[in-house]
Amino acid sequence: MPPPPPRPRRPGLQDLRLRDGHSSDRELQAGPSLTSTRSADRPVPNAPTLATQLRWTAHCVLAVEQGHSLSEVLPQIASALRPGVQALTFQTLRQLGAARALGRLLAQRAPAAPVLALLHSALAVLLGDENGQHYQPHTVVDQAVEAAKQQRSTSMQAGFLNACLRRFLREREALCAQLVDDPVARWNHPLWWVERLQHDHPEHWAAILEANNVPGPMALRVNRRRAARDDYRALLEAAGLSASPVGDDGLVLSAAQPVERLPGFARGHVSVQDAAAQMAASLLLDGRAWSPADRVLDACAAPGGKTAHLLERADLDLLALDVDARRCTRIHDNLQRLGLSAEVQCADAANTAGWWDGRPFDAILLDAPCTASGIVRRHPDVRWLRRASDVAQLVAVQRQLLERLWPLLKPGGRLLYCTCSVFHAEGSEQVNAFLQRHTDAVLRPSPGHLLPGTVVANGEFNDNVPGGYDGFFYARIDKAGP
């Protein structure tokens, strides 16, 4: 029996700092999609039943609805169950708006939360995943009812669940037609999120929402200190894995893979990191020569993907900060695997008196805490964890970090401000306000807002049209000389 869901809570700033998950949460990228109809009902020796997977999926969905991130909940799942449960949970969260609306149509009175979570999970499976794949409908109903019977909190409602799901099968077309005018059900995002995107990106808001419901590709960053990209691509092909180049050091796999299948991963030949996140190193470093005497700060560094990329490209005197001690351990682990070294401190970057030694920096990377609204396709729980009020809270944190770190930059130095957000308040509006306050700040040509799946165009603060990257914002700001 699954343990009771964690006690409800509101996510704090630590939860809001979902950045660089492309390298650190690699298992969240490489999780399988649902099995196709052709093979879904075929027995597999020792494979967990769909009922068991649905039971744990409902547990994860309920935990998210109570304010807990999947990165907190999924590790509780037994390793043998986790891939299937993750796939079902991701699908449910990508269709939760529609599943909730259908649940309201099917049930005159809302059942207890555990029953409702199981109903939503089963409805999401019946709706099908992003590839149109699904289990046989009656198998889903039978297994959902079996899942209900397995738990004390839901067993008394097994008949109710059966009736709701069978009614959905009978009346699916008519029920789904009633969702057409419901934006939350149509786009599977909170209403405030839809409205903010409509305001910020009037030409692309629908494409952003659509992209958020399709899993992103698995991108790799080749460690140029260990292997040339073309040579590593040949290793992938020899292992039966197809990949195409992206950016300076990246490869995009044709299909997601467990990192254990990646040649040389344990020896530091490659890391998992989205192509948008890989842009940071070149944006900060390109255009000048660097030496080990150059001081560089990565202000919000965990889990270390961008830190490592900077060091793969140049020998630097680099200081990496993060406020969370456990995340600092992950920076150390990533650097060790890649054969790199840096000074790592557990400290709040905004509290400069607590960590700065008085020596100014030649360059600063500020990958600021944000809503993570640009990486929803990899973290489908984010949209349901956020509240509209989180945006203003995080904008204040970002502004404070910019104000505290700017004096630490040498005249002639450069600061790269970035967030994995597509909201203007955390990107162009934040930087434009900073430029108004600081006459010594000079904006350099920058990508601006990268929308999920972006094809990058030249210019400053473009709403780049959807393509293949995660959603990001980048602005490089130079400090005028004396």
Image (spheres, grey):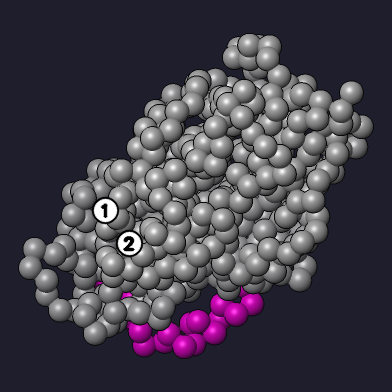
Apparent side of residue 456 relative to residue 439 in the rendered image (left or right): left
Q: Residue at x 40, y 50 (%)?
A: 227
Near-viewer residue (230 or 420): 230
| SS class, disc 2 | helix
Q: Amino acid at mark 1?
A: Glu
- Up the image or down, 474 lies above or below 395; here it is below
Quadrant of the rendering where the C terminus is positioned: top right
Q: Residue at x 40, y 81 (%)?
A: 132
Apparent side of residue 278 relative to residue 228 in the rendered image (left or right): right
- Up the image or down, 257 lies above or below 127; here it is above
Residue 169 in view of the camera: yes
Which quadrant of the structure image shows residue 455? bottom right
- Up the image or down, 359 lies above or below 226; here it is above
The image shows residue 471 at horizontal and vertical percentages of 61, 57
Q: Residue at x 39, y 63 (%)?
A: 233
| SS class, disc 1 | helix
The image shows residue 463 at horizontal and vertical percentages of 75, 62
User: Where does label 2 land, which residue?
Assistant: 235
Q: Residues within 10 Å of mark 1 (few under 14, many from 20)?
A: few
Q: Amino acid at mark 2?
A: Leu
Residue 176 shown in magenta? yes
Near-viewer residue (257 or 191): 257
Apparent side of residue 66 relative to residue 177 in the rendered image (left or right): left
Between disc 1 and disc 2, the foreground one is: 2
Which quadrant of the structure image shows residue 261? bottom left
Whether tag 1 and tag 2 are in contact, CB under 8 A, the answer is no
Residue segment shown in magenta: 159-183
User: Where does label 1 land, which residue?
Assistant: 260
